Image: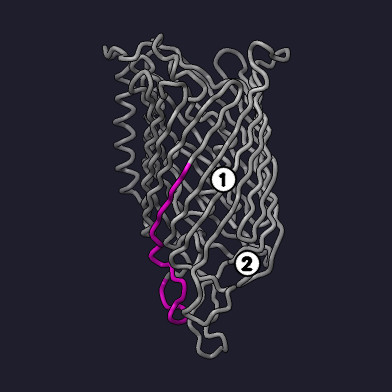
Amino acid sequence: MTTVIDKFGRLVILVALLGAAAGCSGIEPWVAPYERDRLADPIMALDGDPVSTSYIQHVYEAREGARGGEGAVGGGCGCN
Amino acid sequence: MKSARQILVTCLLLLAANGVAFAGVLPEDRADVLYHLYTGGGVDIDGPSVLVRKQVGKSTSFVGNYYVDMISSASIDVVTTASPYNEERKQWSLGMDYLRGNTTLRAGYTSSVESDYDAKTYNVSASQDMFGALTTVTLSYAFGDDIVGTSTDPTFERELQRQIYGIGVTQILTKNLIATLNVETVTDEGYLNNPYRSVRYLDPTVAKGYSYEQELYPNTRTSNAVGLRARYFLPYRAAIEAEYRYFTDTWDIQSSTASLTYIHPWRNWTFTAKVRYHDQTGAHFYRDLFPRSQATNFRGRDKELSEMTSTTLQLKLSYEFLNNANGWGFIKKGAVSGSMHMLGVDYHDFSDLTAGAAIGEEPLYKLEANIFQIFVSFWY
């Protein structure tokens, strides 16, 4: 398990360094803020109904062998 | 575990040290009241869920959620080896988002309580908007501390610890396309069995040809999942979303999950249709029928660990009955939504013992379930 954490840790630190570097980078946004009206439309919200989404993720986690990778952290069982 | 803590602190410091050229945004203030009902396979689960989120000051937002499962179970596992039961699970959670410039720090706590299962989860995360808010990177960590009991033996108590490490990147790709990539590693250590479930093994000394013994799982499990999701704005104001997740773990379960969603607004209505497909291999210690008692070091017959394929069709309809033009006082927007999931699961290595067939000739079990949700949402 230590190996997994070490590998994961190196990846996390790399991403964080990229994030820190972004603060002083010169990359110009290729989609300007005034061009994001469609992305701001409620139908484009990636999680428009958080209560419903977390409930249905719990339903799937209790009935399938897979978990995670969907951008939410949950807890509890209620598995039977 | 020391290294995991060091990684997290390092990352939070790096993100907090970033510039404040672009201001991020806190989640919208909202309240949701939801009723959910799951019915299928001899199991009925229903209950409410209430979520309230409120910004306090300019940089902090608090969120609280209360959720209840009322379970009435006579599932295939229960009717073949135990007695039907009623159970209640209550879960509450509190969380806080703190925004500083283009960095959002979050912390939360969740408690889930059943008569025979107690789970506490602590989570922290940091999100960073970068490249003119085209990109958002999120790092998350959660620690779960569970106590497993049984209703039949009040002295039975086992511990289970869980650690969840996540990285997410959300990227605006074009004026019409946004995508998100999430990688999550989960490690469990402790009592991973279900204390009520049994495995079946060939037993020529009994008339039906098989007997049961308690399952025995490994005490550790590590899983990795990577999920990619993209949503595209169609030219006539509708949206389409595709999602794929690959999962693998140290129990030899591998799965692929894919879904396709279509969202179509019309006046105050929004219609959503989604199809989801999930396919997984079985755990290495899973058997539908073991050749003898204690045949292997680890043994399981939980159908969730069997090779399986599941498909879901979801239909959802929302109606916005309040908007900025006709809001009620401080309430800016209100919507009511109804959703139905039709879930079908084909187990490829889990026999339906209720069919009464001869040993080795039992049909494979199929689960069909419907999941209903109705909820009211207010934004203020």
In the image shown, does B336 or A70 lie closer to the viewer?
B336
Measuring from the top left, give residue B252's x and y in whole percent.
36, 59
Q: Chain of mark 1?
A: B
The percent position of residue B223, horizontal first and vertical second, equals: 39, 50
Tell me, yes or no, whether the highlighted magenta stretch contains residue B302: no
Q: Is residue B186 above or below residue B30?
A: below
Residue marked by disc 2: B78
Please indicate, yes or no, whether residue B6 appears anywhere in the rendered image: no
Labels 2, 1: one chain: yes
Based on the displayed image, in which of its 4 quarters is residue B52 positioned? top right
Query: Is residue B18 left or right of B347 when viewed as pictured?
Result: left
> Which residue is at 43% across, 51% downward?
B278
**Amino acid type, label 1:** His
Give the residues in magenta.
B275-297
Which label sits on residue B341? 1
**Chain to which the residue tagged by mark 2 belongs:** B
Measured Cα–Cα span from mark 2 to mark 1: 24 Å
Question: What amino acid does circle 2 point to?
Answer: Val
The number of discs equals 2
For the C terminus of chain A, give its image quadrant: bottom right
